[in-house]
Image (cartoon, rainbow, N blue to C red):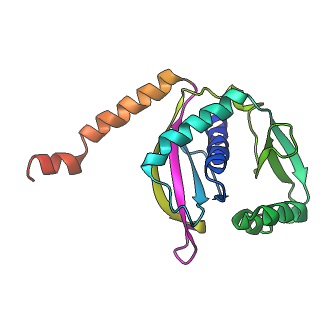
Amino acid sequence: ELVRHDYAHVLAEAVQNLFPGTQITFGPATEDGFYYDFAPNPERGPFTEEDLPVIEEEMRRIIARDEPLVREVWKREDVRALFERQGERFKAEWVMELPEGEAITMYRSGMAEDSWMDLCRGPHLASTGKLDPQSFKLTRVSGAYWRGDPKNPMLSRIYGTAWLNKKQLDAYLVRIEEAAKRDHRKLGQEMDL
């Protein structure tokens, strides 16, 4: 779970590096990977499957830099002010709804003051270099509403799968491929049922 959560953060940093003006929302670990929801720059439009290889390469560059993942405790108002300055309205909204008295933690990717950072409970690995750059794959893109409410803005969700090493990733991808071959919807059409 820890590794998958770190891949989600690297995904968010990569997307913002490649597509300026993209806002970030949430990026949790899942049972077999991770995802992150983004509000793409309106001039650019939603992400597509064709964007995934480019994003993967940027993620590998971030991992190769081996930046420390630094935990910082911030005051709620300072976090809100930072995100408002950056145009991150979703994060600015979310931080104000966290319970009073709860420590507000930010994680910085690197030691420089202008390093990429995100609001996060943590924990994280010591650095991006602890991730195996060959043990993840971005798998698909879908739409998702902010907070799951259709009255809220539509976001782009990028999914990925992540493992501790390439052998585990390859085994997972083979399992998924084999399962797709046996999908009842596919088999039913092929058998004219």
| Residue 9 position in % (x across, y down) | 67, 44
Q: Is residue 61 above or below residue 81?
A: above
Confirm whether the magenta stretch covers residue 157. yes
51 and 95: which is toward the camera:
51
- The magenta segment is 148-164
Specify the farthest residue to the front: 43
Residue 99 in view: no
Q: Is residue 22 left or right of residue 121?
A: left
| Residue 35 position in % (x across, y down) | 56, 49
Please give the name of the residue rendered at 30% of the width and 33% of the height, measured from the top-left corner: 178
Quadrant where the N terminus sits is top right
| Residue 37 position in % (x across, y down) | 58, 56
Quarter of the figure with residue 34: top right
121 and 129: which is toward the camera:
129
Specify the farthest residue to the bottom: 151
Q: Tag count in the figure?
A: 0
Residue 18 in view: yes
Q: Is residue 94 left or right of residue 177?
A: right
Confirm whether the magenta stretch covers residue 77. no
14 and 174: which is toward the camera:
14
Please give the name of the residue rendered at 81% of the width and 64% of the height, measured from the top-left corner: 85
Please give the name of the residue rendered at 66% of the width and 50% of the height, measured from the top-left corner: 16
| Residue 73 position in % (x across, y down) | 89, 50
Quarter of the figure with residue 8: top right
Specify the farthest residue to the left: 192
